């Protein structure tokens, strides 16, 4: 994994990062969300939409997400990611679900 670029962040609330994953030959989005509610979800959708605009302006047309658990897969699907049905091996040897999102 390449060095992560922070696209958007509020410390203690959330962050949205981007890195290039050579194994996937593509860009990966990284998220961490601390506070969760319906109003926060709507806010996070707007943040993601703004970040995807930036990615489109850079010529990035697709991004991936790597998830450790089915729960993370379901969570990422709330933001439009689709499970590819493929798995990757993480740095610690764990199997990770590969999700895809067209920008």
Image (spheres, rainbow, N blue to C red):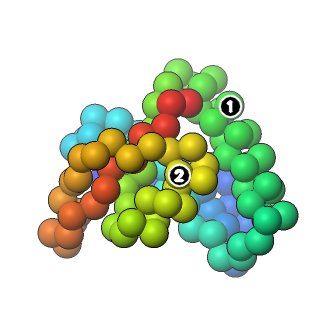
Mark sitting earlier along the chain (2/1): 1
Compared to residue 30, the image places residue 92 above or below, namely below
Residue at x 46%, y 54% (from the top left corner): 4
Q: Is residue 68 left or right of residue 50?
A: left
Please state which of residues 67 and 21 is positioned toward the viewer in this rendering: 67
Q: Is residue 48 left or right of residue 28?
A: right
Q: Is residue 40 left or right of residue 100?
A: right
| Residue position marked by numbered label 2 in the rendering | 77
Please state which of residues 42 and 22 is positioned toward the viewer in this rendering: 42
Please state which of residues 52 and 6 is positioned toward the viewer in this rendering: 52
Calculate the distance from the C-alpha at mark 2 to the C-alpha at mark 1.
Answer: 19 Å
Q: Position of residue 19 (x, y in %)?
A: 43, 47
| Residue position marked by numbered label 1 in the rendering | 53
* Circle 1 crowding by C-alpha within 10 Å: few under 14, some 14–19, many from 20: few
Residue at x 44%, y 59% (from the top left corner): 73
Residue at x 71%, y 40% (from the top left corner): 49
Whether residue 45 is visible: yes
Q: Is residue 86 left or right of residue 36?
A: left
Q: Quadrant for residue 13, please give it.
A: bottom right
Image quarter (top left, top right, bottom left or bottom right) of the C terminus: top right
Contact check, label 2 and label 1, Cβ < 8 Å: no
The kind of secondary structure element at disc 1 is helix
The kind of secondary structure element at disc 2 is helix
């Amino acid at each position: 994994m390449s060095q992560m670029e922070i696209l958007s962040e509020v410390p203690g609330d959330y962050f949205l990062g981007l890195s290039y994953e050579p194994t996937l030959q593509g860009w990966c989005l990284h998220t961490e969300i601390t506070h969760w509610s319906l109003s926060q979800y709507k806010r996070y959708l707007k943040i993601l939409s703004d970040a995807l605009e930036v990615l489109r302006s850079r010529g990035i047309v697709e991004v991936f997400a790597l998830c450790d658990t089915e729960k993370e897969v379901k969570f990422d699907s709330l933001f439009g990611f689709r499970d590819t049905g493929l798995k990757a091996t993480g740095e610690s040897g764990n199997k990770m679900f590969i999700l895809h999102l067209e920008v």
